[in-house]
Image (spheres, coloured by chain):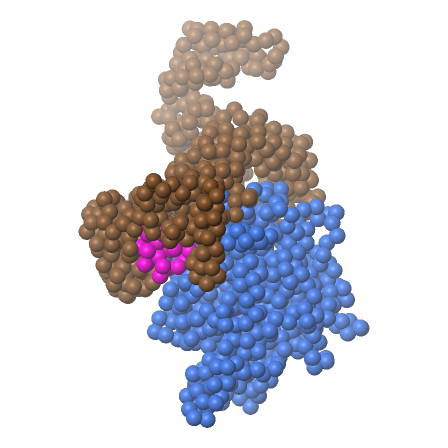
Chain colours: A blue, B brown
């Protein structure tokens, strides 16, 4: 990545000589992102198949994934495709696309389309999203495709003789099928048995056969609200050793459901068991608190969203939940939630108060007014300016025609700019955010119908980049070129089998600074999968200790000598020092 | 929002200049360009309903004409522009509405309605600072409408809250409270005061205000959520849960006279449908029905308006009216399978409409043969009507399409069972019991397995299946009933009676379970209890479902071993009533036997002879033989 100091940062560098530490603390680099998808070989345009009927499903995709599917140490790109909606049986169907990242092999960031060689021409369903996780524990990242149609589990078969990663559709043999309309899915170990379970968020009972024409207030045709159709129940697939058993009902997850769009797995009450949070469109969200597992019968969940304060907004109104991001923007060590919503709602920030209780602090955070005009989908936490605070990126795009675009004669009047919010740090009422989109350059001035959003360090330079999936538009890769203000630490946490340790928590102790806590996850956002690696800004303090709490509750310490700032270090379970049971 | 700055200012000047030229040439003056008035954007109406587009064009033309009229005063012009802005507002065209309201305010700066409605538009658009400023201007103007004054105060208070101006919000809410007294505004003001207190972490005060608001408007269930959260924050988890159980989406309501006005002139149906949907979403179904009715009145040829009204009427239990609306939708769009399917579902709720429902189900499947839910509903309906062959073909179709569709497999199993294919039913039931995802479906599969095994004579296997079903679903009445049957056959009468009773606790409408329990009790020697239970069943089940129970009761009263239970007079009374209600052969025989039991042999003989005479010759030889033997018995017993 080229270093190009902004004016403000340049001023700061001059000031360092005079002010020393003060400037280092107060420096807030302006965001700099370059959009380079096409230039780097990500030649992909999503097609939603719209023909004027306003089919509901045509404006809900696509998701995107950043995952190292060939295991070479850099992030490859998986892009979900739509295609025609009507008359699919007689149509030439486009497929999803896999682009190999050639960074490690060539030293240059570039992508090569390996869809055909990887056997992915089978991914021809009308796609919505993608989840990434190694369900068969063989150290290779598998993919689960959520579709408007039959979902597909693609097993990563490893590298073939030609050095190419191959995938095989194992949906039926693994018992992972679902023909309902699914959007987001999450891999996580919910019963702490060392295997990744799969939760699938299903949306509404919609089919072209029951399509209802809907209109806006003037009577012009427009897309329907999800309330026009009944919600579909979500599904839990419990991993029983490389295949899945349906466990939705036995886990208590069938008791309530809405039109599910976003899902994230996280230990929301810090009791050592991974919980599930489902963002529902125009109905109350679910916060499924994992009550543990007894006698091998699988985990049990109870929806505590209303009591926990995350079911509806502070005013008690359900919102149109789309994407969800789990992270720790206030740096207090627990998991907070951000749910993206429709225009005339807000991107809602639920701050964890401990014990599974949350407060809606959107109003105090500065996000309320800044997100009022936006319909958010993908949402991710990222420290784009390396100041140690988690910032927020949201992929926006309306679901109903925007009047000002109609007035301008726009043929696809749903587009909106995405948004980047800088975390200004914790205030008494929680973190405060500033919408820095207008200052974030051309990449953020693009106005498109964005849906999926994944975060990851695509060029392995120690800062988070963004991959945006646009509905009926080109994919965007936003490379972060924001000037760095401190050393970084990158960790890849692996189970002893070699699979990414989704759900593992890491605590990084530093000299003279508060500990940093992060969780390994690929899920969250909207219909997308992100980089599982942990990326943190260290600031000035030396790392003194790293403690990992694996998903089964076992703790393991790693010596600070095992890691080095400025590069990614793999910490494999069992290779650290002292282990303690939870 | 469009604002006359920068390029817009230049455009505005150009427009004004052009307007002057046009006016001089005698052409109509556009809405823009009147003195200090700003450009009102022309919304994109190309795809709008004709009625809406025509209305807006017409009103806009009228406004343009009025603006050119030098004799019209500014108040008159403000009213015209304000009316146009209100229409834009109702159609959710907020940029145009805001510009219109701003113009109306400029023309009539002493009218509070325009800055008020402008404030509402700004609030909807998320510009709370602008909303606060507009509402402040509205507050500063005197108003002769006390209701409107209250609305201004409450909107202002809510916007102040959004801006975090807690003190201002409190002051405004208190002013509204003082002005409104005990009117519905009181609840709204207390809600704002509760919000203020909650934001200030004064939990006690917040709870007090919300409780007061809830006392005023108990239907405002959203307040329960707010109270639940406060109780949680106060550490009162039980109280919090109690409130959250009652939480809903119904809002505190109060009349907002100026805002209500904007919807009065809405043309077309779509805007009303949207408005109805909003009202429906907060649980005000009857109000939503009224709005949907207006939508249909505005455009009777709109299938969407008919469809939405039909759905809501069905939701409120007005099936006949609902069916009428769906029929209209079918008339307008005969090839729309969903209309036909919805109509069929509604018709199923109406008496004597089963035939029409079946026709519509069939038509829906013809129109959309690949949509499984239509086919499933048709198959279920056909099975209920004992049209097994056709039902079977649809279940087969579903299973060919998706072999893991266990609902379809269960349907097929039931049809196979009913049509005598026990082996087929067993095979399907076993698969459902093993593989269905939903517990209830697995239990149902086991229940059917039990029934099929019982028919095959495998009592232990059947009992095992029922017990497994009950392990999965302890409240599965059918399994308790089946178990009662099996236990009765096995001679375990007290256990059998207990199983029947459990079935009846869950589903008291099962006539056969009442009879089964009474029979088991009688066979267990508990005849008095059997009579008592049958009487209870007769009270619970309405006629005609109670008829088999009444017949059983007559028989028991006639045949009881216990003299304290045997009651021929009671039996006669019941049998007489039964026969009067329905003079069937069975009831006639019961009456004759009862007559004989009280010694009225002549009457018994006469009745039975009459019935014998009315039997078509050779139609029921067994029955005839039975009755003749009774006659012979009574002749020999008689005086």
User: In the current view of this chain or complex, which residue is farthest to the right?
Assistant: A161
Q: Looking at this view, is B247 or B112 the one in front?
A: B112
Q: Where does the image place residue A188, in percent across and percent down from the top left?
A: 56, 67
Q: Where does the image place residue A398, in percent across and percent down from the top left?
A: 53, 56
- Position of A328 with respect to B426 (left or right) is left
The C terminus of chain B, quarter of image: top left
Of helix, strand and loop, which mostly describes the magenta segment?
helix
**What's the magenta region?**
B114-135
- Position of B533 with respect to A226 (left or right) is left
User: In the current view of this chain or complex, which residue is farthest to the front?
Assistant: B24
**Residue A562 lies in quadrant:** bottom right
Q: Is residue B618 above or below residue B375?
A: above
**Residue A297 lies in quadrant:** bottom right
Who's the residue at 57% across and 59% down the image? A449
Q: Is residue B121 magenta?
A: yes
Q: Looking at this view, is A511 or A383 the one in front?
A: A383
Q: Looking at this view, is B477 or A176 the one in front?
A: A176
Q: Looking at this view, is A203 or A345 the one in front?
A: A345
- Position of A186 with respect to A97 (left or right) is left
Q: Where does the image place residue B402, in percent across and percent down from the top left?
A: 67, 47
Give the number of callouts. Answer: 0
Residue A169 in view, yes or no: yes
The N terminus of chain B, quarter of image: bottom left
Q: Where does the image place residue B485, in percent across and percent down from the top left?
A: 53, 36
Q: Is residue A313 above or below residue A577?
A: above
Who's the residue at 61% across and 63% down the image? A469
Q: Is residue A114 above or below residue A74?
A: above
- Position of B177 with respect to A338 (left or right) is left
């Amino acid at each position: 990545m080229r270093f190009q100091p902004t004016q403000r940062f340049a001023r700061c560098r001059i000031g360092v000589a005079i002010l020393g530490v003060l400037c280092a603390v107060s420096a807030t680099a302006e965001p700099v992102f370059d959009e380079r998808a096409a230039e780097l070989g990500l030649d992909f345009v999503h097609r939603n198949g719209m023909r004027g009927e306003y089919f509901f499903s045509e404006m809900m995709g696509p998701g995107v994934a950043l995952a190292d599917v060939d295991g070479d140490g850099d992030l490859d790109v998986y892009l979900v495709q739509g295609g025609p909606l009507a008359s699919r049986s007689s149509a030439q169907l486009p497929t999803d696309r896999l682009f190999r990242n050639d960074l490690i092999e060539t030293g240059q960031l570039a992508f090569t389309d390996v869809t055909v060689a990887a056997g992915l021409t089978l991914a021809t369903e009308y796609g919505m999203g993608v989840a990434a996780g190694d369900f068969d524990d063989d150290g290779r990242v598998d993919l689960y495709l959520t579709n408007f149609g039959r979902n597909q589990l693609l097993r990563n078969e490893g590298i073939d003789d030609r050095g190419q990663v191959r995938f095989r559709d194992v949906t039926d043999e693994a018992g992972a099928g679902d023909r309902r309309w699914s959007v987001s899915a999450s891999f996580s170990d919910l019963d702490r048995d060392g295997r990744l379970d799969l939760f699938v968020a299903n949306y509404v009972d919609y089919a072209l056969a029951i399509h209802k024409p809907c209109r806006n207030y003037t009577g012009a045709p427009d897309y329907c609200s999800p309330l026009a159709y009944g919600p579909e129940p979500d599904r839990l697939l419990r991993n029983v050793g490389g295949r899945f058993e349906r466990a939705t009902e036995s886990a208590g997850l069938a008791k309530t459901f809405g039109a599910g769009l976003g899902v994230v797995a996280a230990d929301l009450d810090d009791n050592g068991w991974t919980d599930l949070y489902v963002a529902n469109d125009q109905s109350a969200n679910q916060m499924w608190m994992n009550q543990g597992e007894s006698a091998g019968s699988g985990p049990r969940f109870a929806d505590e969203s209303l009591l926990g304060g995350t079911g509806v907004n502070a005013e008690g109104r359900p919102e149109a939940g789309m994407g969800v991001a789990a992270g720790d923007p206030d740096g207090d060590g627990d998991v907070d939630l951000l749910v993206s919503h429709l225009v005339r709602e807000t991107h809602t920030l639920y701050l964890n108060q401990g014990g599974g209780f949350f407060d809606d602090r959107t109003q105090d955070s500065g996000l309320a007014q800044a997100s009022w005009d936006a319909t958010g989908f993908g949402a991710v936490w990222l420290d784009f300016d390396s100041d140690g605070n988690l910032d927020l990126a949201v992929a926006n795009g309306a679901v109903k025609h925007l009047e000002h675009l109609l007035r301008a004669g726009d043929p696809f009047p749903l587009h909106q700019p995405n948004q980047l919010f800088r975390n200004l740090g914790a205030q008494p009422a929680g973190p405060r955010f500033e919408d820095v989109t207008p200052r974030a350059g051309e990449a953020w001035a693009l106005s498109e119908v964005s849906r999926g959003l994944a975060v990851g360090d695509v060029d392995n330079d120690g800062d988070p980049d963004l991959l945006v999936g646009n509905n009926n538009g080109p994919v965007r890769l936003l490379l972060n070129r924001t000037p760095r203000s401190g050393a970084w630490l990158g960790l890849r946490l692996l189970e002893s089998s070699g699979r990414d340790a989704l759900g593992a928590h890491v605590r990084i102790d530093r000299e003279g600074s508060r500990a940093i806590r992060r969780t390994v996850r690929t899920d969250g956002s909207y219909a997308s999968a992100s980089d599982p690696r942990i990326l943190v800004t260290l600031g000035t303090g030396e790392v003194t200790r790293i403690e990992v709490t694996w998903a089964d509750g076992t703790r393991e310490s790693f010596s600070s000598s095992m890691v080095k700032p400025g590069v990614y270090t793999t910490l494999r379970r069992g290779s650290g020092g002292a282990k303690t049971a939870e | 929002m469009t604002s006359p700055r920068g390029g817009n200012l230049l455009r505005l000047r150009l427009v004004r200049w052009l307007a002057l030229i046009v006016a001089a040439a005698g052409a109509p003056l556009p809405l823009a360009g009147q003195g200090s008035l700003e450009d009102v954007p022309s919304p994109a109406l190309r795809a709008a309903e004709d009625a809406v587009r025509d209305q807006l064009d017409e009103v806009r033309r009228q406004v343009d004409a009025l603006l050119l009229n030098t004799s019209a005063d500014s108040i008159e012009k403000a009213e015209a522009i304000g009316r146009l802005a209100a229409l834009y507002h109702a159609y959710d065209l907020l940029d145009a509405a805001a510009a219109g309201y701003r113009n109306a305010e400029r023309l009539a700066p002493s009218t509070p309605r325009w800055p008020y409605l402008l404030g509402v538009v700004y609030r909807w658009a998320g510009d709370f600072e602008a909303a606060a400023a507009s509402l402040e201007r509205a507050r500063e103007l005197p108003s002769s409408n006390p209701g409107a004054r209250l609305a201004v105060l409450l909107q202002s208070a809510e916007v102040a809250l959004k801006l975090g101006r807690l003190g201002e919000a409190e002051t405004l809410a208190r002013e509204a409270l003082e002005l409104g007294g005990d009117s519905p505004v009181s609840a709204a003001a207390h809600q704002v005061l509760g919000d203020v207190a909650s934001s200030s972490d004064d939990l006690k005060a917040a709870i007090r205000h919300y409780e007061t608001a809830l006392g005023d408007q108990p239907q405002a269930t959203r307040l329960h959520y707010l109270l639940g959260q406060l109780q949680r924050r106060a550490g009162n988890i039980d109280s919090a849960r109690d409130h959250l159980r009652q939480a809903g989406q119904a809002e505190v309501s109060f009349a907002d006279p100026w805002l209500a006005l904007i919807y009065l002139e809405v043309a077309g149906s779509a805007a009303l449908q949207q408005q109805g949907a909003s009202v429906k979403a907060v649980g005000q179904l009857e109000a939503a029905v009224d709005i949907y009715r207006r939508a249909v009145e505005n455009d009777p040829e709109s299938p969407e308006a008919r469809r939405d009204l039909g759905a809501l009427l069905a939701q409120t239990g007005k099936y006949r009216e609902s069916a009428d609306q769906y029929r209209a939708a079918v008339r307008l769009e005969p090839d729309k399978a969903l209309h036909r399917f919805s109509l069929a579902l509604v018709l199923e709720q109406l008496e004597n409409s089963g035939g029409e429902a079946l026709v519509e189900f069939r038509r829906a499947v013809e129109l959309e043969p690949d949509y499984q839910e239509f086919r499933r509903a048709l198959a279920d309906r056909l099975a209920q009507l004992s049209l097994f062959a056709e039902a079977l073909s649809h279940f087969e179709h579903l299973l060919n399409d998706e072999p893991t569709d266990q609902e379809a497999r269960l349907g097929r199993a039931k049809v196979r069972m009913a049509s005598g294919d026990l082996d087929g039913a067993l095979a399907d039931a076993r698969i459902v019991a093993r593989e269905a995802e939903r517990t209830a479906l697995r239990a149902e599969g086991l229940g059917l397995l039990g029934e099929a095994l019982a028919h095959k004579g495998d009592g232990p296997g059947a009992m095992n299946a029922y017990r497994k079903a009950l392990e999965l679903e302890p409240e599965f009445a059918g399994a308790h009933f089946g178990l009662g049957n099996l236990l009765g056959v096995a001679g375990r009468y007290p256990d059998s009676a207990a199983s029947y009773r459990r079935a009846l606790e869950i589903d008291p409408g099962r006539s056969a379970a009442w009879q089964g329990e009474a029979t088991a009790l009688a066979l267990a020697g508990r005849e008095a209890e059997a009579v008592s239970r049958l009487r209870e069943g007769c009270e619970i089940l309405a006629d005609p479902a109670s008829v088999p129970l009444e017949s059983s009761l007559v028989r028991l009263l006639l045949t009881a071993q216990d003299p304290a239970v045997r009651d021929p007079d009671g039996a006669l009374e019941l049998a007489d009533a039964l026969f009067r209600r329905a003079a069937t052969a069975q009831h006639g025989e019961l009456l004759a036997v009862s007559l004989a039991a009280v010694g009225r042999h002549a009457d018994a003989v006469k009745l039975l002879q009459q019935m014998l005479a009315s039997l078509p010759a050779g139609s029921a030889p067994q029955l005839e033989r039975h009755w003749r033997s009774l006659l012979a018995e009574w002749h020999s017993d008689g005086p």
